[in-house]
Image (cartoon, coloured by chain):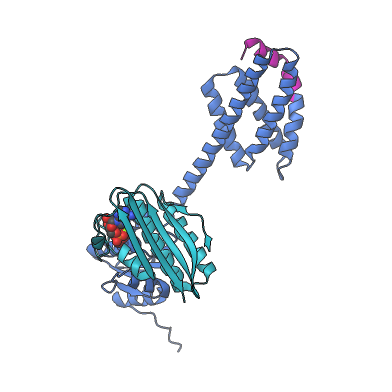
C-alpha cells in the first residue's frame, strides 16, 4: 500500500492541485479515461466543499488492495463545523450555499464506496474508494 | 555603525572598488550574451548601491534597490550572483577593518551589510511578485474571449480550470460581447475544460439563462464522452440546454437557427 502526501485545500488552487494529484495517481493505478474523470470530479467536489464550508482540510490519496481488487482511496478530512444532518446533505438538491446540491450525492454515484463521519463542531471525514475493474 | 568606520570605508573606496569589480565582473560575465557595456553598467550600479547606501537616507535606498532588482529581472540575471558579490565584498572590507577596529565595530558593519542583502532579496521577491501579478492580468484578459465567427454567431472557447474569478469573467465577457457583436447564437466550447464539476455545471447553466435573458441563444459544445458520463453521475440534467458534441456541429446548428447554411459553390 502506498500513501501519497495529502494535499492541503486552503485556496481554490488547492482544489486544482488535489485533483491533479488524484488524476495522476488514477492514471498510475491504471484507471481508464472515464474513471479518471470520475475520480478527478469527485475530488473536485470534496475539495470544493472543504474550501467553501471549512477553514482547513486535506485530501488524502492512497492506493488500496483487497483480495484481487486494486483501487484508489480518497479521503477528505477537515476540522470544520461538521454536518448536522447527514441524511439531508446526501439528498440531491440540498445546498446551504445556493449550489446545485449535487456534490455529495454525486460523489457517491461517481465512486464505489462512500462513508461519511461528521461531528458537529469537530469536522468531517469522508472516505471513498474507486475499484479498478 | 560608527562614523569613523564609515569615513574609513570611504577613504578606502577606490581600493575596494577595484578589488570588487574583479569579483563582480567574473560573476556577471558568467551570463551569456551580456555586452561589456552592460556588465560595466550593472557592476557600477551595484557598487553605487553599496557605497551610497552607507551615506544616504533609508527611503532613497529602498527605491534604488527596487530599481536595481527590476533591472536584474529585466536582464534575467540571478540575484544569487549579486548576493555572492556582496559576500565577497564583505570579506574584503571585513579583513581590512579587522586590523583597525574593535570587534563590535566590525560586527556593526557586517550587520549593516546583512541588512542590505536581505533588503535586496526582499526587493527581488517583490519584483517577482509584480511579474506574476502582471502575468495574471494578461492571462485573465485572454481567459474568456468571445470571438465573432459569422454574422450574429460568436464562439467562446474555454481552456483550463474555471475558478470563481474566471467564472465571473466569462459571464461579463459574454454579455458584453453579445451586445457588441449583435450575437444571436453563442457557442461555448468546453473541450479544453479538464473537469466539469457541479460548480462549473452550475455556472454553465447560469450563463445559458443569462444569455437567454438578453434574447440570444447559447449552445454548449465540446462535451467529451467522459465528461458527459460524469455529468450524468452528478445527476445534473443538461437536457434543457442545447448541446452538441463538437464545434463543427455547433456551427451548423447555429447557422440553421439564423436560417443559413454552408453549401459548396456550384461549378458551372
Ligand atoms: N466538509 C463539509 N463541512 C461542513 N458542511 C459540509 C461539508 N460538505 C458539505 N457540507 C454541507 O452539505 C451541503 C451539501 O453539499 P453538496 O456538496 O452536496 O452541495 P453544495 O456544495 O451545496 O452544492 P454543489 O452542488 O455545488 O456541490 C452543503 O451545502 C453544506 O451545507
Ligand atoms: Mg459541494
Q: Is residue B136 visible?
A: yes
Q: Compared to B157, does B101 lie above or below?
A: above
B194, A6: nearer the viewer? A6
Query: Which percent across, then down, holds residue B142?
Result: 44, 55
Which chain has been coloured cyan in this picture? A
Region of the chain picked out in magenta, as a range: B1-17
Query: Which percent across, then down, holds residue A47?
Result: 39, 56
Main SS, magenta residues: helix
Q: Compared to B197, does B104 lie above or below?
A: above
Residue A76 appears in which quarter of the rendering?
A: bottom left
Which residue appears at 30% of the width and 70% of the height? B235
- In the displayed structure image, the side of residue B83 where residue B156 appears, left or right: left
Colour in which chain B is drawn: blue
Which residue appears at 54% of the width and 33% of the height? B122
The N terminus of chain B, quarter of image: top right
Query: Which percent across, then down, holds residue A106?
Result: 33, 67
Amino acid at each position: 500500500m502506498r500513501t501519497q502526501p495529502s494535499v492541503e485545500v486552503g485556496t481554490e488552487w488547492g482544489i486544482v492541485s488535489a485533483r491533479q494529484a488524484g488524476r495522476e495517481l488514477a492514471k498510475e493505478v491504471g484507471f481508464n479515461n472515464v474513471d479518471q474523470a470520475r475520480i478527478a470530479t469527485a475530488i473536485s467536489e470534496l475539495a470544493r466543499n472543504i474550501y467553501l464550508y471549512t477553514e482547513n482540510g486535506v485530501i488524502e490519496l492512497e492506493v488500496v488492495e483487497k483480495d484481487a481488487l486494486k483501487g484508489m482511496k480518497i479521503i477528505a478530512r477537515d476540522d470544520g463545523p461538521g454536518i448536522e444532518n447527514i441524511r439531508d446533505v446526501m439528498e440531491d438538491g440540498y445546498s446551504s450555499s445556493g449550489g446545485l446540491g449535487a456534490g455529495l450525492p454525486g460523489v457517491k454515484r461517481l465512486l464505489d464506496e462512500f462513508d461519511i463521519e461528521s461531528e458537529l463542531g469537530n469536522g468531517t471525514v469522508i472516505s471513498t474508494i474507486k475499484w479498478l475493474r | 555603525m560608527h562614523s569613523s568606520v564609515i569615513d574609513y570605508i570611504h577613504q578606502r573606496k577606490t581600493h575596494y572598488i577595484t578589488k570588487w569589480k574583479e569579483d563582480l565582473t567574473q560573476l556577471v560575465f558568467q551570463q551569456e550574451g551580456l555586452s561589456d557595456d552592460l556588465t560595466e553598467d550593472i557592476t557600477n550600479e551595484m557598487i553605487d548601491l553599496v557605497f551610497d547606501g552607507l551615506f544616504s537616507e533609508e527611503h532613497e535606498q529602498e527605491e534604488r534597490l527596487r530599481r536595481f532588482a527590476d533591472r536584474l529581472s529585466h536582464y534575467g540575471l540571478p540575484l544569487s550572483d549579486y548576493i555572492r558579490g556582496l559576500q565577497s565584498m564583505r570579506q574584503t572590507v571585513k579583513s581590512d577593518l579587522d586590523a583597525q577596529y574593535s570587534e563590535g565595530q566590525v560586527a556593526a558593519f557586517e550587520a549593516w551589510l546583512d541588512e542590505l542583502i536581505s533588503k535586496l532579496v526582499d526587493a527581488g521577491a517583490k519584483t517577482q511578485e509584480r511579474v506574476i501579478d502582471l502575468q495574471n492580468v494578461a492571462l485573465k484578459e485572454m481567459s474568456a474571449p468571445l470571438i465573432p465567427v459569422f454574422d450574429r454567431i460568436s464562439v467562446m472557447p474555454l481552456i483550463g480550470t474555471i475558478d470563481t474569478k474566471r467564472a465571473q469573467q466569462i459571464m461579463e465577457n459574454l454579455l458584453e460581447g453579445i451586445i457588441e457583436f449583435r450575437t444571436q447564437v453563442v457557442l461555448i466550447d468546453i473541450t479544453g475544460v479538464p473537469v466539469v464539476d457541479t460548480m462549473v455545471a452550475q455556472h454553465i447553466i447560469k450563463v445559458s439563462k443569462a444569455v437567454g435573458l438578453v434574447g440570444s441563444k447559447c449552445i454548449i459544445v465540446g462535451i467529451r464522452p467522459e465528461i458527459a458520463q460524469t455529468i450524468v453521475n452528478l445527476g445534473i440534467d443538461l437536457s434543457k440546454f442545447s448541446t452538441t458534441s463538437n464545434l463543427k456541429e455547433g456551427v451548423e446548428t447555429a447557422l440553421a437557427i439564423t436560417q443559413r447554411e454552408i453549401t459548396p459553390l456550384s461549378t458551372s
